[in-house]
Image (spheres, rainbow, N blue to C red):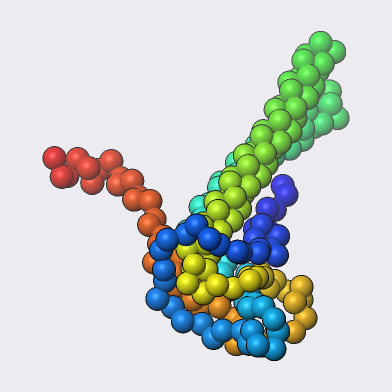
Amino acid sequence: MKKYIFSALAIAAMMVSCNNANSKMDEQPAAADSATSGMKVAYVEVDSLMTQYDFAKDYSVTLQKKSNNARNTLTQKGNALQAAVNNFQQKMNNNGFTSREQAASQQAAIERQQRDLQELQARLENELANETAKFNEALRDSLQNFLKAYNQDKQYDMILSKAGDNILMANKKYDITNDVINGLNKRYKPAKKEEPAEKKEEKK
């Protein structure tokens, strides 16, 4: 089964120039030297954002659980299919079928089982891919919305994402990662977890 990994491209090369936001954040990053550069530039470390933004951490746990459940399901189905194939082959070798029709019927059943497994794998992979895409979109939207408000006060001409070596060198004074993570976490309101049925009964 394919592994789906969060893509840093989901938030790469993000430019922000805001005129319509009305909220302000209290963080104070070091400003770029506009006198020498001609523009104010900042960047955000994507790796740090993915590991320290609570929304990203929570969603990572959710996606990992879905991936593990899908893998376990496919493993169980695959083992059952392999057992059926082994049983069929053993009967063939030992003349265990009373007729050709019986052998053909069991072979057809194995083929159906194999098709069902392939369809299940495709469906689970598609569901996981859709869930990952949903996460990437939500992450991008939350970051863009935050930066619009954040930049109302900071007035950066450009805010870049730094992932791997896409920015070969940058002065740390342009790094606003911690400010962005802190601001995002202040805004983030995790969904309430559903209580187990037994605990609900205890409260009644």
| Residue located 51% across and 52% down the image | 62
Q: Residue at x 40, y 76 (%)?
A: 26
Foreground of the two, 35 or 143: 35
Rendering coords of residue 78 (x, y %): 69, 39
- Report the side of 44 relative to 194 (left or right): right
x 68%, y 73%: residue: 162
Q: Is residue 80 visible?
A: no
Residue at point 75% right, 77% down? 167
In the image, 50 versus 176, the foreground residue is 176
Residue 169 quadrant: bottom right
Considering depth in this image, is 7 or 129 the residue closer to the camera? 7
Depicted 190 relative to depicted 169: above or below: above
- Height in image: 17 above or below 73? below
Q: Is residue 10 left or right of residue 103?
A: left
Q: Residue furthest left?
A: 204
Tell me if residue 25 can be seen.
yes
Q: Position of residue 186 (x, y in %)?
A: 39, 66
Q: Position of residue 165 (x, y in %)?
A: 76, 76
Where, by quadrant of the figure, is residue 108 drawn? top right
Total numbered labels? 0
Residue 56, placed above or below residue 72: below
Q: Is residue 134 left or right of residue 125?
A: left
In which quadrant of the rendered image does the C terminus lie?
A: top left
